[in-house]
Image: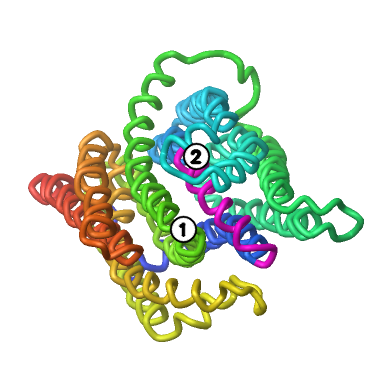
Amino acid sequence: MMPPMSYLAHTRTILALGLPLIGGHLAQFAIGLTDTVMLGWYGVAPLAAQTLAGSYFFVFFMLGSGFALAVMPLVAAKAAAGDETGLRRATRMGLWLSLAFAIAAMPAMWWAESILRALGQSDQIASDAATYLRIAGWGLIPALLVMVLKSYLAALERTQVVLWITLLAALTNGLANYALIFGHWGAPELGLRGAAIASVASQSVALVAVVIYAARALPQHALFRRLWRGDAQMLARVFRLGLPIGLTMLSEVSLFSASAFMMGWLGTVPLAAHGIVITVASGTFMVHLGLSNVATIRAGAAYGRGERQELARGARAVTALSLVFAVATITAFLTVPGPILSQFLAADDPARAEIVATGVALLAIAALFQLVDGAQVIALGLLRGVQDTAVPMLVAVFAYWAIGIPASYTLGFTLGLGGPGIWLGLVFGLACAGVFLMLRFWSRSVHRAALAA
């Protein structure tokens, strides 16, 4: 038996795999950031509408991403065991399930205006958000397929290509946004519609790029050969693993989406401030998410080889890295909030001062959940690696829906704290999830492994 890796060796391996994945997540985040910044320059009303529409779209994207994320631990375990047929089967059925989900979700994009009005949004914001979603909703199809193929490549530790493909998509989105929102380079000035078209274009470019790479770089897997042939056994396995992952992600995303809807009840300026701060917090979260993906890959490989001691060591190393970054983020949020927020608004915007003042308070509260947000996503990554998804789903639903959302409403409206109260509810939900999920991993996976050793 090989000697166990040192913590330093684990850290180096995590960073070697994780930095490209973090870069890829940041590049993906840059697509939404570009929309937020450019629409913020274009006007507060389009920014508010895109904030609401983005939250709505993200709910469906996260739920559908469960099947893509299920592919990651399955492919990692199959690759560790040398089972190329198994990893091909898992990836193909992930593509099948993702495509089926995206098609099923399209009516919700088309009739978003009625749904948003039923959720208490004003007629104007609901109408503008629906205008965006009727175009951007089509991007759900390529976005979910890209997610599956990125998971397949990441599980094979080909993380650098994931970064480059996402950078290509971000560049496409930025150029298309600049042309179509403002009408530059001879393009029509489409405003909110232009941002939606740019998003679909970037997702489509990413799909073409990742398909070409997978087909040419890994021909031995024959991933797209006879893709139409079903595999009921693997389809069921990916579904059973992926549905709880999707519901877990949905429960977290719904917490933030519910907060966006509640901020919308307070008015356009609070919603715009919320959109900026949630964008900033999402950017820092991408680092934890990249580390979570590495946790899934490394835990999946250790699980596939039966190396339980390595599972524990790797888990401690990736958790420590997440903690270090969280402390750095908290420091930035508390010491330089004004300069961070000011980057998202035009200098002559009449609502600039009010939005920044609201955003400073929200950013201070966002600093509170950096530690627990990182903890919960790292724990989820580790649990997915050992293919434990059902109980974590129940924990997430309880933490976010039974604690987080009611706390946001109670603090924001019943106790009259407004936007800061809504955000404090987010802290409560994330803290509960972080504690319970970490306890689940260390008590179930590692404690049992110690006994086995």
> Which image quadrant is residue 322 in?
bottom left
Q: Residue visible at 53% across and 37% down? A: 148
Q: Amino acid at mark 2?
A: Phe
Residue 261 is situated, as x and y percent measured from the top left of the image, at 41, 49
Q: Is residue 270 left or right of 386 when viewed as pictured?
A: right
Q: Secondary structure at mark 2?
A: helix
Q: Which mark is residue 61?
A: 2
Q: CA distance from mark 1 to mark 2?
A: 26 Å
Which residue is under mark 1?
267
Q: Is residue 409 above or below residue 398?
A: below
Q: Secondary structure at mark 1?
A: loop
Colour pattern of the rendering:
rainbow
Q: Residue visible at 22% across and 54% down? A: 410
Q: Residue furthest right?
A: 186
Q: Residue visible at 43% across and 72% down? A: 358
Q: Residue furthest bottom?
A: 335
In the rendered structure, which disc, 1 or 2, sits on the residue that comes first in sequence? 2
The region drawn magenta spans 41-60
Q: Is residue 340 above or below residue 255?
A: below
